[in-house]
Image (cartoon, rainbow, N blue to C red):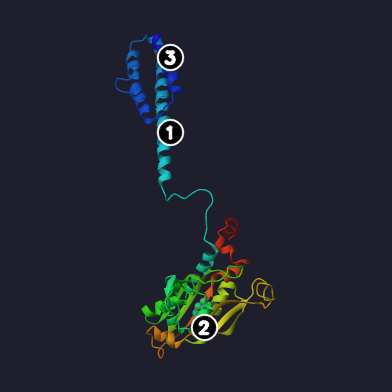
Amino acid sequence: MQYKVEIEQLLQEAQSITFACVEEVENYRIRLLGKKGVLGDLFEKFKTIPNEEKREVGQALNALKTAVENAIATAREKFENTVSDSREIDDLTRPSGGENGHRHPIWQIRDKIIDIFSRIGFVVAEGPEIEDDWHNFSALNFPPDHPARDMQDTFFVESGDNTNNISLRTHTSSVQVRIMEKQKPPIRAIFPGRVYRNEAISARAHCFFHQVEGLYIDKNVSFADLRETLLYFAKEMFGSSTKIRLRPSYFPFTEPSAEMDIECSLCGGKGCPFCKHTGWVEILGCGMVDPNVLENCNIDSKVYSGFAFGMGIERQANLKYGVKDLRLFSENDKRFLAQF
Ligand code: PHE
């Protein structure tokens, strides 16, 4: 009688037992299923009970054993999961749940420009944002005290006299010099990067913005090569029916120089406030690399010629996305960024 009550109590215990830690589960296992455990005793005593009771008690005893084993298995599983959960949190390569970020619209345009030029053999290079006078101005044929230096309002880091200043680069053209000093032609490369100018911040101007510079130096490079390269770019970037026009311009480091407009994609060329009702928007400056610049970089200007261009990324993002206020690109307002 006592025997059956004991089985019944142990069964109830097995069905309702909870454990605080793995050690408690192990202690329970040893107490019930261990070599000298309770169940072993019960099975030992089972041999001595009267035959007519064996069937009923045998079933109860087996049910108890199953219940104990289940209780232990369930508890172990629970603790194992807890452990692996905390391991997963430590796994920094695990993808995060919820919202995914994406590239900034300026970087999306930058990547697209790189992609378009890499398809026609241009490689990517970069240069420093803090630049000396030689790379930002002098090697690019800006004479000392020449008013052209004022075309670009410079942020000075260290001011010396006119030709040994350190400044934040005002254009990516500085990277042209760095590449030509290091590499022998043929050179076919683009240089994306951030540039700085001391300007009052408004919807149309900012104290920093992004450019992609392009440079191609080889034998017999002509202005026609420049034009076709830029036309290819405009069509890939803004659609195959895009029209371009080149207007004569001036840069100290190119001769002849031009500015390239594309048909305003916000109004389709009809005229709107963004294109100042002209139907055209300027997106880059370009020209044939001035022989003086080649010589400054130890490239023989009688053997080699080349072209260069420099385009603003923000302006193109304006056109592609219809964003009219430049400031939005650097405010990091999630409501703005989430739209791209
Ligand atoms: N560096 C010029 C600018 O920032 C653009 C340019 C690049 C013009 C290369 C000609 C050749 O305005």
For label 1, the SS is: helix
Depth check, mark 2 against mark 1: the one in front is 2
Gap in angstroms between the C-alphas marked 3 and 2: 109 Å
Residue at image position (59%, 72%) is 238
Gap in angstroms between the C-alphas marked 2 and 1: 77 Å
Image quadrant assignment for residue 124:
bottom left
The first of marks 2 and 1 along the sequence is 1
The first of marks 3 and 2 along the sequence is 3
As shown in the figure, which amino acid type bears the numbered disc 3? Glu
Residue 140 horizontal/vertical position (percent): 45, 82
Residue 219 horizontal/vertical position (percent): 42, 87
As shown in the figure, which amino acid type bears the numbered disc 2? Pro
Q: Nearer the viewer, residue 69 or 334?
A: 334
Q: From the image, which quarter does the C terminus lie in?
A: bottom right
For label 2, the SS is: helix
Residue 330 position (above or below residue 143): above
Where is mark 3, residue-wise? 56
Q: Nearer the viewer, residue 82 or 211?
A: 211
Image quadrant assignment for residue 263:
bottom right
Q: Which residue is the extreme one toward the bottom?
A: 302
Q: Residues within 10 Å of mark 1 (few under 14, many from 20)?
A: few
Residue 172 in view of the camera: yes
Tag 3 and tag 2, C-beta contact below 8 Å: no
The first of marks 1 and 3 along the sequence is 3
Gap in angstroms between the C-alphas marked 1 and 3: 33 Å
Where is mark 1, residue-wise? 78
For label 3, the SS is: helix
Residue 72 horizontal/vertical position (percent): 40, 28
The yes-or-no answer for disc 2 within 8 Å of ligand 1 is: no
Where is mark 2, residue-wise? 147
